[in-house]
Image: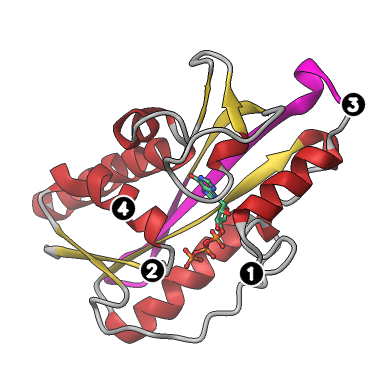
Amino acid sequence: MEHRIVFATGNEGKMREVRLIMADLGMEILSMKEAGADPDIVEDGKTFGENAEIKARAVWEQTGGIVMADDSGLVIDYLGGEPGVYSARYMGEDTSYEIKNRALIDRLAGVEGQDRSARFVCNIAAVLPDGQVVHTEETMEGLIAMEPAGDGGFGYDPILYLPEYGKTSAEITIEEKNKISHRGKALEAMKDRLKEIFREETVR
Ligand code: ITT
């Protein structure tokens, strides 16, 4: 059985959440940098699932073992699903989230209530030592806030308002976010899948 998982991301905000969520699996979690992998990755998939697999496979080609990747983003219904799979690249990769968040709020000027519905989506792809791939996908539902709020989390967290908390995703703690978030739920589901796969392997 493998004792380590390489996580194929260059995003430190994601990596912080991943380490906490995966801590109880009893396996070493390495970022791709820590594993010495540095592939050229072209995220040209049309779905979160395709992009997650592209990233995981590119790193797996260099490291082998178990490699996971996360492809995620913010889907705003009123904008026909934008920024979606382009969330990191929306308005340019180097544009600050202060500017991106403000721009999205401005694009929803005059839109009210449930018409501001949006969600974070996260697809996790795990490439296993034999090259087989497993996916899980989850969402965190909310509304686009009228104003950005909070300085926790990363990216679009200040503008996803969670009605049941009365707060944005940037105003709750990382522990609270991990319990309810797209990434938290998709990684929990992946942990269950991996446990099943390892159990089948030991029985065989
Ligand atoms: P890697 O590909 O290296 O993992 P990335 O940031 O480019 O890093 P993605 O292509 O998956 O990752 O883009 C995800 C973007 O979606 C991310 O940069 C944020 O803008 C947004 N996003 C995803 N999950 C989020 C979260 O939990 N909170 C806030 N924004 C999030």
Of callouts 1 and 4, which one flags the residue occurring earlier in the amino acid sequence? 4
> Are dots 3 and 4 in contact, CB under 8 Å?
no
Residue tagged 1: 93
Residue tagged 2: 8
Of callouts 3 and 1, which one flags the residue occurring earlier in the amino acid sequence? 1
Dot 1, how many residues are within 10 Å of its Cα: few (below 14), some (14-19), or many (20+)? few
Q: Which residues are magenta?
A: 110-136
Is ligand 1 within 8 Å of the beta carbon of the residue shown at mark 1? yes
Residue 172 in magenta stretch: no
Residue tagged 4: 16
Residue tagged 3: 110
> Are dots 3 and 1 in contact, CB under 8 Å?
no
Colour convention of the picture: secondary structure
Q: Dot 1: what SS? A: loop
Q: Amino acid at mark 1?
A: Glu
Residue 124 visible in the picture: yes
> Are dots 1 and 2 in contact, CB under 8 Å?
no
Of callouts 4 and 2, which one flags the residue occurring earlier in the amino acid sequence? 2
Q: Which of labels 1 and 2 is toward the front?
A: 1
Label 3 to label 1, Cα distance in Å?
A: 28 Å
Label 1 to label 2, Cα distance in Å?
A: 18 Å
Dot 2, how many residues are within 10 Å of its Cα: few (below 14), some (14-19), or many (20+)? many
Residue 98, position as x, y percentages in the image: 63, 51
Q: Dot 4: what SS? A: helix
Of callouts 3 and 4, which one flags the residue occurring earlier in the amino acid sequence? 4
Which residue is painted at 32% across and 38% down in the image? Answer: 188
